[in-house]
Amino acid sequence: MILAKDEENDAEVRREDQDQINEFGMLNARLHEVRREADRLKVRSARVLDHKLLEKIDDASTELMMGNGDRVMLRLGGAMFEATEDEATEFCEAEVERNQETLDKLSEEEGGILGRQAGLKEKLYGRFGKSINLEDK
Amino acid sequence: MSSSEVVNAAVAADSGNSQEEPVANISLESITEGKNDRGIPATKFLDDIELFANSFKPPASPELLIGAYSDLYSKFKAYEQQLEQKRATYEEKLPEIEKSITLVRHLKEKKEAGESGVVTRYNLADTIYSKAEVDCSQGIVNLWLGANVMLEYTYDEALELLTSKQTVAKKDFKEVSEDLTFTRNQIITSEVNISRIYNWDIRRKRESKRAGSN
């Protein structure tokens, strides 16, 4: 990208600038990972087997409640085990809690990353202006 | 091969080419500084490009420097790919181990609750499940160890083995992730070095033109 004469920036890149640029890159990579993991829990993905996990558990709990007290199948690992309605409901609730906790932690991390990125952007744009681009394509 | 051997081998292979640009004259050591715990070299950050160029005998041309750093950049990029694949493998492995742990714990609970027979449906073929009764009072479970070998374990032994496998997998995953971050940092530093050398060269030429026309 060729800059116009008056847009050129002569600020030298110091080691600390390089470190900040590297940190920004690392945060960005982590941000994408965090979002991918959160999506796996929340959003319907293209892969048929990866439906919203939390919603799936929710659907299962609803079915259980509407059930007629018969024994139900609980899927653990590759096999299915017979279980009572109560056991299954307990299992579902525990799963929901676990996944929700994970989701909350991921949201927190995402917020933290965005905050740090904003701080870095301020410093780097302040120093290098148009000579640097920190936006996601 | 360790990672530093990989990079060195690639550099040696390059110097076998007959090129007009003597890229081989710039050694890996001169453009890197140190390495991380697993032997991946770190790109040298250039505090002063002019000084750096003149540190070579004869003083390195911008083309030479850019060439050397571009090479380094490509090698890091290739290594990044490898690491990403490795990481994806570990990412898949961990949930598998966790599933097994959950299963064994479930069986153990059933045994401790005094239930002797657990009815399960297992995967007979792709779309068919078959009914089976599992006797948990035995307290025995069989685990695949790889290479088509299956071994018998008590529930506690199995949990011990699986949890230690899990610990190792988590550690490997952490190491690969760290290496990946490190490699990416070297990629960014190399890119920035290339831009700076290029800009420095442009400015130098501009100034000499200005000085020449005075």
Image: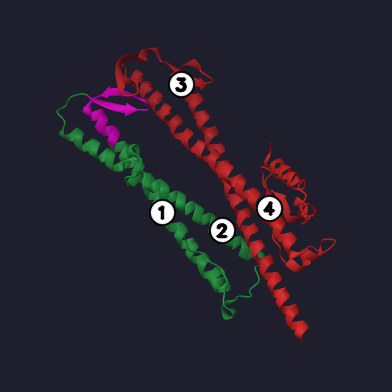
Chain colours: A green, B red
State the residue position of label 3. Answer: B156
Q: Nearer the viewer, residue B38 or B49?
A: B49
Specify which label sits upstream in the sequence, 3 or 4: 4
User: What residue is pinned by disc 1?
Assistant: A108
Q: Which numbered disc covers residue A23?
A: 2
Task: For mark 3, give the secondary structure.
Answer: helix
Task: Kindly indicate whether the residues beneath marks 3 and 2 are on one polypeptide chain.
Answer: no
Chain letter for mark 3, please: B
> Which residue is the site of mark 4?
B71
- Rounded to the nearest angstrom, the CA distance separating label 3 from label 4 is 53 Å
**Looking at the picture, do discs 2 and 4 lie on one chain?**
no
* In this rendering, position of residue B129 left or right of residue A7: left
- The amino acid type, in three-letter code, at marker 4 is Asp
Indicate left or right for B157 with A13 as reference: left
Q: CA distance from mark 1 to mark 4?
A: 39 Å
Position in image of residue B160 (x %, y %): 50, 25
Determine the CA span between mark 1 and mark 2. Answer: 19 Å
Image depth: mark 1 or mark 4 in front: 4
Q: Residue at x 44, y 50 (%)?
A: A34
Horizontal placement of B83 versus A81: left or right? right
Residue type pointed to by label 3: Asp
Of B18 and B69, the residue lying toward us: B18
Tell me, yes or no, whether the two marked residues, 1 and 2, touch with CB atoms within 8 Å.
no
